């Protein structure tokens, strides 16, 4: 129960922000959220990754009396956040299965005695009678429900154990709750409110825009080479994540990247748990590691200086795409996201939806989500405008920071090529794959074509004016737009859909996009278009352009940070973020007062690390 003898707040939120985190002011809606929660209000917060969601409950945790209970879905996320908070001098701990029994008892005692500011716990543990009894004996300041989209069956990371969290409101009705997520469409938001009983909560809906991310989508063409070129040209020293659809592909890509001299590691559910944990720890604590992974990797990763995310295969929805690409550039510095996308991916994604055992209403939603994803891939509009529009946000003008802005896509009346493609599918019996159909259209008398008499069809040779790649683009778009579908019997052939006859008979027209030509071999010297972009080639050694002298200082500061982190067994970014190191490079402070004024240099870090970093700065200036 509240103690009337205590002042309402321990400290003003703005003072906590400055003293502990070293930031002079809140960003965006942070101030309004913090004020609302500190005053005891419930909140549902939707804020993009990297916009400072954690501060929205960490600041109230230090302002309000008592301990804040943070419900977090993954052990790695708990550990990283607690490491970072302890570096700031905050009394934080976690309870999970990695702790010894005595450690668990000591943390429970500290919670009960008011010696903790934040306690992180998994949802499974929170709803146990033992933990609920602990809460009854403790003074609770706030419940923070992180990754709240996990409560929704419409969300892409549904976790059944989150459904039990409504017990918090039932058992502790006067303790405020804040639910946070980086991505949730209207349906998922409604589910969060209903399942967590947050009907009276104030909704804080921030812009979904991540202005520091550059979005690129490239038609697959020698995808391994495209990946390698992308990393070597602009991200040779950077940490990044490469997502693949299957475990086998993860292993193959990671092995191949290592053969090319890159520090690459695999991560998927099929690996031994110790191997997975070791690879994840190395990615977090080392510099320049590339993690090749399935979507099993990422939700619990708090690493702010991931400079690129590559999808070797498209995800199943724009929510998943947004969440996964959001792991790049969490520190606000420039980062790139690339998706490689081809005909086979479109067919596979549509098959996965149609062949799923989901109930009819869920399958209908899956189709809608897939249509939105394919529309994003095939759009000729600004990528950022298209993506934000999906989340209900109007972006007024093209962003200038995506591939379709850098290299506007040309479209043409594709009705006649589309009719030829559909006719080839129909006349060959709706049983053959795209390779055979293209051979027929281009008039190639292969053994397979002549054996089946397809060289005698009217469509044989009617498409000689287009190259194999151009026909692949046509077929990909016809599947994406729903005129063609994969054979439901699973024989690999294409069949006409109910939409096809109107286009085939000329009752409907279609505009198609031309994929930008990939200058694969010549691109190394003059263009980045070989992997989906434009602009000069420049091996990047820092997130932004630096002079030679500043680049040397940047590397010296990173080396010092890595040494300090290794001594303590913590990730380098919990010492200082890249963004703070970049401020040191820009400002070159010469004394502790000037260093302490930089964003991200709080009182505790200044005391602990100030002299080390000042020595390096003075040596280089």
Image (spheres, grey):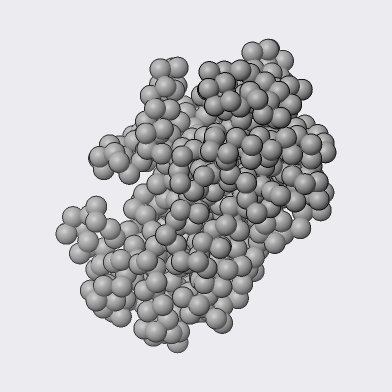
Q: Nearer the viewer, residue 39 or 438?
A: 438
Q: In the rendered view, would you say 398 is above or below 340?
A: below
Going by the image, does 104 lie left or right of 316? left
- Report if residue 603 is visible in the image: no
* Rendered residue at 47%/60% (across/down): 147
Percent coordinates x, y for residue 195 in the rendering? 46, 75
Q: Nearer the viewer, residue 397 or 58?
A: 397
Q: In the rendered view, would you say 298 is above or below 405?
A: below
Q: Nearer the viewer, residue 58 or 287?
A: 287
- Report if residue 147 is visible in the image: yes
Q: Quadrant where the N terminus lies? A: bottom left
Percent coordinates x, y for residue 177 in the rendering? 48, 74
Q: Quadrant of residue 400?
A: top right
* Rendered residue at 37%/79% (across/down): 167
Tag count: 0
Percent coordinates x, y for residue 273 in the rendering? 26, 43
Percent coordinates x, y for residue 472 in the rendering? 64, 30
Q: In the rendered view, would you say 327 is above or below 253?
A: below
Q: In the rendered view, would you say 565 is above or below 468?
A: below
Going by the image, does 410 lie left or right of 235? right
Going by the image, does 112 lie left or right of 345? left
Toward the left, the furthest residue is 101
Going by the image, does 345 lie left or right of 478? left
* Rendered residue at 57%/18% (across/down): 446
Q: Quadrant of residue 486?
A: top right
Q: Quadrant where the C terminus lies? A: top right
């Amino acid at each position: 129960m509240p103690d009337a003898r205590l002042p309402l707040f321990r400290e003003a939120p703005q003072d906590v922000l400055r003293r502990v985190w070293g930031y002079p002011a809140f960003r965006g809606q942070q101030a309004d959220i913090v004020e609302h929660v500190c005053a005891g209000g419930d909140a549902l917060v939707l804020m993009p990754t990297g916009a400072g969601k954690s501060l929205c409950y960490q600041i109230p945790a230090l302002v309000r009396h008592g301990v804040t209970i943070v419900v977090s879905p993954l052990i790695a996320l708990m550990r990283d956040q607690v490491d970072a908070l302890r570096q700031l001098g905050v009394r934080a701990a976690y309870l999970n299965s990695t702790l010894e029994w005595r450690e668990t008892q000591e943390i429970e005692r500290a919670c009960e005695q008011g010696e903790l500011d934040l306690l992180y716990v998994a949802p499974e543990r929170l709803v146990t009678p033992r933990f609920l009894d602990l809460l009854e004996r403790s003074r609770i300041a706030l419940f923070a429900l992180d990754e709240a989209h996990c409560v929704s069956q419409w969300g892409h990371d549904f976790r059944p154990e989150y459904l039990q969290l409504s017990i918090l409101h039932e058992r502790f009705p006067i303790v405020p709750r804040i639910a946070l997520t980086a991505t949730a469409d209207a349906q998922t938001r409604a589910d969060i409110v209903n399942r967590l009983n947050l009907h009276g909560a104030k909704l804080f809906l921030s812009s979904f825009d991540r202005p520091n991310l550059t979005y690129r989508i490239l038609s697959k063409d020698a995808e391994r080479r495209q990946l390698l070129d992308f990393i070597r040209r602009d991200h040779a020293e950077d940490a990044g994540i490469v997502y693949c659809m299957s475990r086998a592909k993860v292993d193959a890509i990671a092995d191949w990247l290592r053969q090319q001299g890159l520090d690459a590691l695999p991560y998927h559910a099929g690996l031994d748990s110790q191997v997975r944990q070791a690879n994840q720890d190395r990615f977090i604590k080392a510099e320049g590691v590339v993690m090749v992974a399935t979507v099993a990797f990422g939700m619990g990763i708090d690493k702010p200086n991931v400079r690129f995310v590559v999808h070797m295969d498209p995800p199943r929805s724009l929510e998943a795409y947004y969440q996964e690409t959001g792991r790049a550039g969490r520190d606000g510095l420039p980062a790139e996201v690339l998706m490689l996308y081809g005909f086979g991916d479109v067919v596979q994604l549509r098959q996965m939806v149609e062949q799923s055992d989901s109930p009819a209403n869920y399958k209908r939603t899956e189709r809608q989500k897939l249509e939105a994803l394919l529309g994003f891939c095939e759009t000729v509009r600004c990528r950022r405008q298209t993506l934000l529009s999906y989340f209900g946000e109007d972006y007024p003008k093209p962003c200038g920071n995506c591939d379709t802005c850098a290299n506007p896509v040309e479209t043409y009346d594709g009705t006649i090529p589309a009719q030829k493609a559909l006719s080839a599918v129909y006349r060959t019996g709706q049983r053959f794959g795209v390779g055979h159909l293209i051979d027929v259209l281009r008039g190639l008398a292969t053994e397979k074509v002549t054996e089946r008499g397809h060289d005698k069809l009217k469509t044989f040779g009617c498409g000689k004016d287009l190259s194999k790649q151009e026909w692949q683009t046509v077929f990909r778009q016809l599947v994406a737009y729903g005129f063609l579908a994969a054979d439901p019997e699973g024989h690999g052939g294409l069949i006409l859909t109910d939409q096809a006859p109107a286009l085939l008979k000329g009752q409907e027209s279609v505009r198609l996009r031309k994929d930008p030509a990939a200058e694969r071999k010549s691109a190394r010297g003059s263009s980045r278009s070989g992997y989906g972009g434009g602009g000069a080639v420049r091996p990047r050694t820092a997130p932004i352009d630096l002079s030679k002298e500043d680049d040397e200082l940047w590397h010296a500061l990173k080396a010092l940070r890595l040494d300090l982190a290794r001594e303590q067994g913590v990730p380098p970014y919990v010492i200082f973020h890249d963004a703070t190191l970049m401020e040191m490079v820009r400002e070159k402070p010469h004394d502790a007062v000037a260093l302490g004024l930089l964003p991200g240099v709080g009182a505790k870090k200044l005391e602990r690390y100030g002299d080390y970093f000042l020595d390096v700065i003075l040596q280089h200036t």
